Image (tube, grey):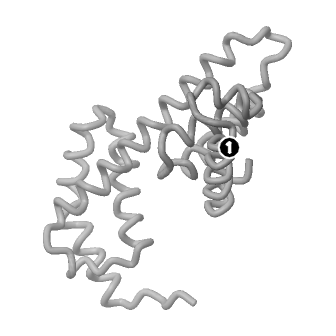
Amino acid sequence: MVSPVSVSDTSKLSYFFSDHHRWLLQYVQRQLNHRSDAEDTAAETFCQIIAARVDPAAIEQPRAYLATIARRLIFDRYRRRRLEEAYLERLMLLPEALAPSPEQTHLLLEALHAIDSSLAGLPLIVKKAFLLSQLDGLPYAEISQKLGVSERTVGRYMTQALRQCYLSGAHP
């Protein structure tokens, strides 16, 4: 059971936020060049500190700490955007009759984001094997040829990727 946040903790978080929010917002805005994205990223940075139950008083270098979290969030934002663009480009190649509806496209993008997040810590070759299997429907023999590895290795890659998806809650 998660213990409730005390008044003292709330007060510390409030002071930490007010002391560093303006600086963080300016820092993130320089990285993103878009105010609303910067505001979202700054807010998410503080939300992550709250979710991790970090005591602000224990942070020795608050700006470095905040910048590290923000950079990771910015990187994730760019990665998600590239993933969406690649998916939408592939959709444009489909005949209009086969193209998914806007609702289906939205659901598929959400699923891609979940899978991308769950595969984030895996080696690139494992991700490639997984995507060739799951998105392109290639059999292990073709994947092994494309990647220059044995079919057995492809099987190990798939096991690794599927385990990662299962543990993260993103079930393909």
Q: Which residue is disc 1 drawn over?
A: 152
> Is residue 40 positioned above or below 103 on the image?
below
**Percent of width and height locating residue 69:** 31, 57
**Percent of width and height locating residue 63:** 17, 60
Q: Residue at x 65, y 18 (%)?
A: 90
| Left-right relation of 94 to 15 | right
Q: Residue at x 42, y 86 (%)?
A: 5
The image quarter containing residue 94 is: top right
Question: Image quadrant for the N terminus?
Answer: bottom right
Q: Residue at x 35, y 58 (%)?
A: 45
The 10 Å Cα crowd at callout 1, few under 14, some 14 to 19, many 20 or more, is few
The image quarter containing residue 129 is: top right
| Left-right relation of 82 to 42 | right
**Percent of width and height locating residue 91:** 69, 18
How many numbered marks are there?
A: 1
| Left-right relation of 11 to 126 | left
| Left-right relation of 67 to 106 | left
Pick whichever, 146 or 74, lies toward us.
146
Q: Residue at x 48, y 45 (%)?
A: 123
> Is residue 157 positioned above or below 16 on the image?
above
Secondary structure beneath dot 1 equals helix
Residue farthest along the right direction in this orientation: 97
Residue farthest along the left direction in this orientation: 61
Pick whichever, 29 or 89, lies toward us.
89
Pick whichever, 38 or 31, lies toward us.
31
Pick whichever, 81 or 165, lies toward us.
165
Amino acid bearing label 1: Arg
> Is residue 83 positioned above or below 119 on the image?
above
